[in-house]
Amino acid sequence: MPKPSDLLQGTLDLLILKSLAREPLHGWGIAKRIQSLSDEVLSVQQGSLYPALHRLEQQGWITADWKDSELGRNAKFYSLTREGKKQLDLELEIWKRLSSAVGLLLKRA
Amino acid sequence: MSVTRFIHIWRQRARSLFRKQRLDDDVDRELQFHLEQLEKENLEAGMSATEARRAARRTLGNVSVLKEECRDQRRVGWFYDFWQDIQYGIRMMRRRPGFTAIAALSLSLGIGANAAILNVGTKLLLGDLPLPDAEKLVLVRVLAKPALQVSAAAVPDYVAWSKGNQTFESMGASLASQQDLDGDDTHPDPERLFGQSVTPSLFSTLKVQPQMGRVFQEDEVQVGFAAPVVILNDQLWRRRFDGDRTILGRQIRLNGRSVKVVGVMPAGFIYPNENSEFWVPLAFTKFQLENSAALFTVTGRLKEGITARQAQADLESIRSQLVRNRQDGNTVRGVFLVPVRNMWFGWILQPLLTLGGAVILVLLIACANVSTLLLARLPARQPEVAVRLLMGASRGRIIRQFLTESLILSLIAGTLGLAVAFLGMRSLAGLQHPAGGISIPLMGWDGGLLGIVALLSVISCGLFGFIPAVVAFSSGTGLKHVTAHRRRGRLSGILVSVQVGLALILLVSSGLLLNSFVRLLLDDRGFNPDGILTFQYRIPIADYVRRFGSFHGMPSVEIEPPTLQIQQVYEKLKTLPGTDFVAGSSAPPVNVILPPTATVLIEGKPIPSTAEERAAARVFYFLVTDNFFDTMRTPVLNGRNFARQDTRSSPWVAVINETMARQFWPDEDPIGKHFTVDAVFGEQQREVIGVVRDVGLQYIRSGPPQAVAYSLYLQQPARYEGFNGGAFGQMTFFVHSNLNPIVLESAARRVVAEVDPARPLSNFQTMEEYVGDGIRRRRYAVSVLGVFALMATILAAVGVYGVVSSSISQRTREIGIHMAMGASSRDIVRLVSRRAIQLIAIGLSWGILASLFLSRLLETQLWGITATDPMTFAAAIALLIGVSLAACYIPARRAMRVDFAEALRMD
């Protein structure tokens, strides 16, 4: 069985930001959200989520807080900062442009 | 980037740095939570407990790698690596204290010495001067045509320049002045003071204000008249007047004249040099305004935006007009501007360049040496590097670790170097300055020095740390052991020959300086300064002049020479206990800037008429007392010395030197010949009674010998009309004794005060100090360079030693086999030192070439030898060969005692 294609660099960041757009989530929650949103097509290498989260935190797009989770355990919840929201809009814009361009290219080929 | 994000990011960084443990725990908990969730999911999917855990781990991936990746995201890893490297480096150093001490000490000497010289050089040659806007201040001098000597300027020039120039804001003139200050109640002893007569415009040109009182006003000088006022410097004010704040308006007595104190200059004000303690107004006489005796120092302040070149052209055009209008024959080639900075500190350039060159070599040698020592340690560290690489350290990380170790070493060296720099600056401040210059101020620690030391530390870290770091990294990786070993050997070989070559350059340069210094000391100058104390007694010409006038366009005087007065002082000095010879001369026989001259008319020869003939008939001329040659221990070569029988009433006699004898009586015996000095009223014919050995007029750099004539002080006209009037009133005395100069000085002052209480003796110096002007500077350069050269030689020997001993330790088995096969001990020594000898030969060859090239830079500082003096080169090469062969031989001898059986078993 072919492995689900590796996510494009930057795509993971976009998915994380998008999944945090509605509400703060912990890492597990983000993994689940991405899985369900993508109808299991894209499977995120779950481990790679964490370095990405830490990178985004260092860059100031997201912040983290320890809170009680719905699962009854204390968990680290990530939420978008104001800057993060702007960044998400920007990246969505870029993504749309890129995907339509690539789509067009593939159609012509 | 917005501000909030910026702050956010830096808060994150700070947390990453300071809350490391907490963040690491957070990552643990976070990943643990994820694993638990996965496990729960798997259990719900019906897996067994063990299976569920294993599957969860599989899904998430290697937890420790993940943790490491998360940590890497914090971007402060380098900091922890660096910290780790530092701790590691310090541990390595403590394990080898001997190596660390040697390396740090040799580096610190190099760094400190370089820093001292750079700091002094940049501050004095580029930094601020103690005068406002001093960059615009220049001294104006003229180049006199006959000898093209630089001289000061004449009054007509100064007047024309200050009126006619377009390029100067203002100008001032000054002239050195000596005044005898009378004693008073608190300071009863009279004292000779050294100061300056200055035009009122000088202070405004310098843009300085007194701390108290005022500067001179324009109406205080008129032609031939200067107001009786004086300005004191801070030091004189404190020393002689106890810093009395009510001094303004007080009358003090200078040269027996009552003068009013009108100002006190601030502490630290120096102009034109350090020994100017007072300033009096300078008024030109009518004669000076028409005549061109170039004696005056002219200082000008350039207008904004005017270059020295423009100003020079401006003054030159004014001067050429002046010369055209004036038929005085004293034609002048050009005007020459000297920035005040050059006058003061120009002299430090040469010693700083010489020393600077030497200390750069020392630093390079120290770096090469530390580099070889580090390379020699590498095999021992091979396993460590290999393990680290296996554990996943990157190559960059290994290089970084080695460089960090080097950096620690160089920072330790830099810290020690600060102390070295401090001592170095102290010793530079003690350097004796030549006439006109001022001494190097004592400098302390400051930001500039710290910066220079830090920079030098980092540079030397790069120099000595780079090669070992790269070699460590490449030998720890794919390269085969043998290849790596060979490369290391080649590199340390190159470094050793570099050290040998650099050491040779230093040895040759210090050898050349030492050689010429010894020649300078041992050279026969026709007199012996040992044990002589010299001082001056002076009667101002104003006290015995009858009339000023002019004769053939030159200033002349009609005077009654104060011969008896001087004779009284001389007789008194002869009564000093503990002295064997006392003598006097109208001027010191050596190191006078303008030694007195006279034109001689030889009996039976035509009277010189043209300017050239007159110039050829000029000799240097001294009036001396009868004991002069005995005191100076100048040998009489022919005829007789002055003696008691030569008195005021006996026939006038003269003694001449070898050169004068040769010049005026080339094929005859000069004894018994006659000449007359300066065909002026009052002079008589003198008979040549003796010929003495030449005494060089300058102690250093004499040039060709000059004709000198000596006549007796007693045999001078009772009434004199001529040019040398000033010579009669001054006497430099020389007292030869075994007494302490300080004891002798007070005794001399006491006996002279008995006959002349008003005129103090001055300029007390031992003759050695007097002629030593410039000698001490040379001695300094010689000794500093000598120490550095010695150090360089030792370091080079250490390098050679290191190469030989490491080659022995790597070839123990080979040596064992050779010995078992019956090789003689000489064969073994040859075997192990062959390579070292090759390296020494390479080092010497390039060192000789470089020395031949570089020693030319020392040419101007040498005396009596050329820059390629073969003896010096040979001695330096022999010394270096000797020392490095010894460094070979010691470990090689040890090699011979190797127990070959054990050596063969070793494996």
Image (cartoon, coloured by chain):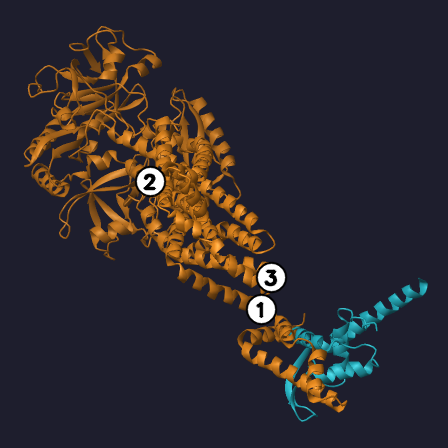
Chain colours: A cyan, B orange
Identify which residue, B844 or B155, lies in the foreground. Answer: B844
Residue to which mark 1 is pinned: B77
Mark 3 near mark 1, Cβ–Cβ under 8 Å? no
CB under 8 Å between discs 3 and 2: no
Q: Is residue A100 left or right of residue B552?
A: right
Whether labels 3 and 2 belong to a single chain: the reply is yes
Type of amino acid under label 1: Gly
- Check disc 3 and report its element: helix, strand or loop: loop
Asked if residue B128 can be seen in this view, the reply is no
Inspect the image, locate mark 2, and give the three-letter code of the amino acid beneath it.
Answer: Gly
Q: Residue furthest toward the right?
A: A108
> Which numbered disc flags the more N-terminal residue, 3 or 2?
3
Q: Label 1, label 2: how many angstroms apart (C-alpha)?
A: 49 Å
Percent position of residue B85, x then y: 50, 64
Q: Which residue is mark 3?
A: B394
| Residue B601 x, y percent position in the rendering | 24, 12
Check disc 2 and report the residue beneath it.
Answer: B786
**Disc 3 vs disc 1: which is toward the camera?**
3
- Could you tell me how far apart the alpha carbons at marks 3 and 1 are, in whole angstroms? 13 Å
